[in-house]
Every structure is written in structure tokens, then in C-alpha cells.
């Protein structure tokens, strides 16, 4: 049974840092793309960052470029999202998701087959 579990969310002040972790298991074949997404109240879910399980390629949304870093540990089957210089607009429920077949880091959610339950990130003074 495929399972994705997010952890590491919390409350942090503007300018602070958090590190999210996504642990994935139960895949018959290793998923090709693992992405982090977020959804703020009243807004659509958006892609934040993705990493390729094939060649470690990464891609970031413009809004987080230079502040967030995604990384993969292929032994532990985890994908971390290091978030620095957090802003109030980063407040959202953060999810990880997988595309099993190819590289895709876009906003069309139908290309991701499996999702975690999410972890809340709140940036507030």
C-alpha cells in the first residue's frame, strides 16, 4: 500500500526556518517525481518544488526560489523541504505527492497519483 507521510510543520515567525519531511513507502517501483505542494485557505493548491528520483533534478516555484531547497534521500525514501526566510504568505497546508512515470513539476494535479495528508505551516509574528 502506497503511503506518503509529511512531518515538520509548525508555527514560525517571519524570517524563520522550518524543515519538512515526506516519507514515502509501498511503491512497487520508485516514483519518478516527488513534489511538495501547498494550499492556503481560499486558494488553489500549487506546486512549490519537485525533485526527480531518477537524476535528482529539481524545480522551484518563482515565489520560493532562493529560499526553499528540496532534497531526496534515496536510501531512507524521504524528500525534505528546507524552508528559509519564511514569509506570512508561505502559510499553508503543505503536501507531498508523487508522479510514478515521468518528470512533471507543474500545477496540474491530475498528474500526481498519490498524496499525503499534509502538514500545516504557519508564519506569523
Image (cartoon, rainbow, N blue to C red):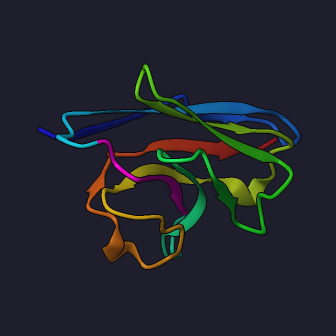
Range drawn in magenta: 30-39
Residue that appears at 51% across and 50% down: 94
Instruction: Report which quarter residue 89 is drawn in.
Output: bottom right
Q: Position of residue 62 (x, y in %)?
A: 78, 69
Number of marks drawn: 0
Indicate the quadrant containing the N terminus: top left, top right, bottom left or bottom right.
top left
Instruction: Report which quarter residue 124 is drawn in.
Output: top right
Residue that appears at 81% across and 39% down: 84
Q: Is residue 113 left or right of residue 50?
A: left
Indicate the quadrant containing the C terminus: top left, top right, bottom left or bottom right.
top right
Instruction: Report which quarter residue 15 is drawn in.
Output: top right
Residue that appears at 21% across and 40% down: 27
Residue 60 higher or lower than 15, as above or below:
below
Closer to the camera, 4 or 59?
A: 59
Q: Residue furthest left?
A: 1
Q: Main secondary structure of the magenta part?
A: strand
Closer to the camera, 75 or 69?
A: 75
Residue that appears at 81% across and 52% down: 87
Q: Is residue 113 left or right of residue 43?
A: left
Amino acid at each position: 500500500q502506497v503511503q506518503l507521510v509529511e512531518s515538520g510543520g509548525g508555527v514560525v515567525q517571519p524570517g524563520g526556518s522550518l524543515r519538512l519531511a515526506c516519507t514515502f513507502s509501498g511503491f512497487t517501483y520508485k516514483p519518478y517525481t516527488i513534489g511538495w505542494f501547498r494550499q492556503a485557505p481560499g486558494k488553489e493548491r500549487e506546486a512549490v518544488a519537485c525533485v526527480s528520483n531518477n537524476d535528482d533534478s529539481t524545480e522551484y516555484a518563482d515565489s520560493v526560489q532562493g529560499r526553499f531547497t528540496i532534497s531526496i534521500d534515496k536510501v531512507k525514501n524521504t524528500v525534505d523541504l528546507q524552508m528559509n526566510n519564511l514569509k506570512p504568505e508561505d502559510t499553508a497546508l503543505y503536501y507531498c505527492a508523487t508522479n510514478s512515470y515521468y518528470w512533471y513539476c507543474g500545477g496540474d494535479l491530475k498528474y500526481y497519483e498519490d498524496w499525503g495528508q499534509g502538514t500545516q505551516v504557519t508564519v506569523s509574528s
